[in-house]
Amino acid sequence: MKKATGSSDTTKPATTAPTSGTIIGKVFNGRSGTGLTQEDVAEGLKQALSQGVNRGTSQLASVDGFLKNAAVKVLLPPELQQVEQSLRKLGMGNLVDDAITSMNRAAEDAAGQAAPIFINAIKQMTIQDGFAILKGSDTSATSYLRNKTTAPLTDAFRPVIQGSLEKVGATKYWTTMINAYNKVSFKKVNPD
């Protein structure tokens, strides 16, 4: 095969803007001296965290996002473990399962509304915050987000969770479970 003479290939290699992954990778590999500014690094971290938040909240907001994920599955509170054990021994485990499933469905329903709160915390991140996360432990980003979002999430989610609990019928299952327990137990439990 002959090359055409007198012509040169003017095709330039494709260039793309650095992604958050490549920026963070360079920082971790000690190659940040490649013209990246502190602002570039902070922006890359913000992009990576935002993508993670969007992906995570999307997964949690899907069916079984909570229920089938042992790390976040909503269980009965410790003070109701006796209720659960008693009902299961009496063959009423389905009441417990219905209550747990409905609480997880409520969490899945509400999860999608958490992303904007996390994204707002990420947008407010300073360069110093970003470098503290990059240089910190494996849980630095989690600690930062927990510190910045716990109060706003709690305030925003109280009515959302209540609405989600009602929407999926969790309050009905909860009340049914507690009432069944109260019929067979000498130690009554308040359904509220």
Image (spheres, rainbow, N blue to C red):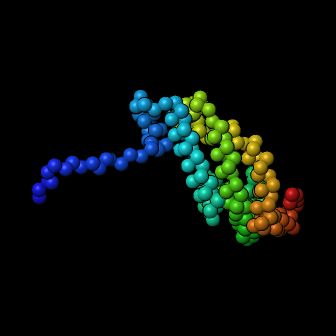
Examine the rendered structure and indicate whether residue 169 appears above or below residue 17: below
Q: Residue at 46% across / 38% down in the picture?
A: 23
Nearer to the camera, 166 or 53: 53
Does residue 71 appear in the picture of this structure? yes
Q: Residue at 41% across / 34% down in the picture?
A: 29
Examine the rendered structure and indicate whether residue 182 appears above or below residue 23: below
Examine the rendered structure and indicate whether residue 15 appears above or below residue 36: below
For residue 9, side relative to residue 163 (left or right): left
Q: Residue at 59% across / 52% down in the picture?
A: 54
Nearer to the camera, 4 or 87: 4
In this view, which residue lies farthest toward the left? 2
Quadrant of the rendered image containing residue 35: top left
Quarter of the image with the C terminus is bottom right
For residue 183, side relative to residue 107 (left or right): right
For residue 143, side relative to residue 37 (left or right): right
Q: How many marks?
A: 0
In this view, which residue lies farthest toward the front? 6
Q: Residue at 86% across / 64% down in the picture?
A: 182
Quadrant of the rendered image containing residue 139: top right
Spot occupied by residue 60 in the image (x, y as percentages of width and height)? 62, 57
Does residue 174 appear in the picture of this structure? no
Spot occupied by residue 13 in the image (x, y as percentages of width and height)? 32, 47
Quadrant of the rendered image containing residue 128: top right
Examine the rendered structure and indicate whether residue 104 appears above or below residue 71: below
Quarter of the image with the N terminus is bottom left
Spot occupied by residue 49 in the image (x, y as percentages of width and height)? 57, 44
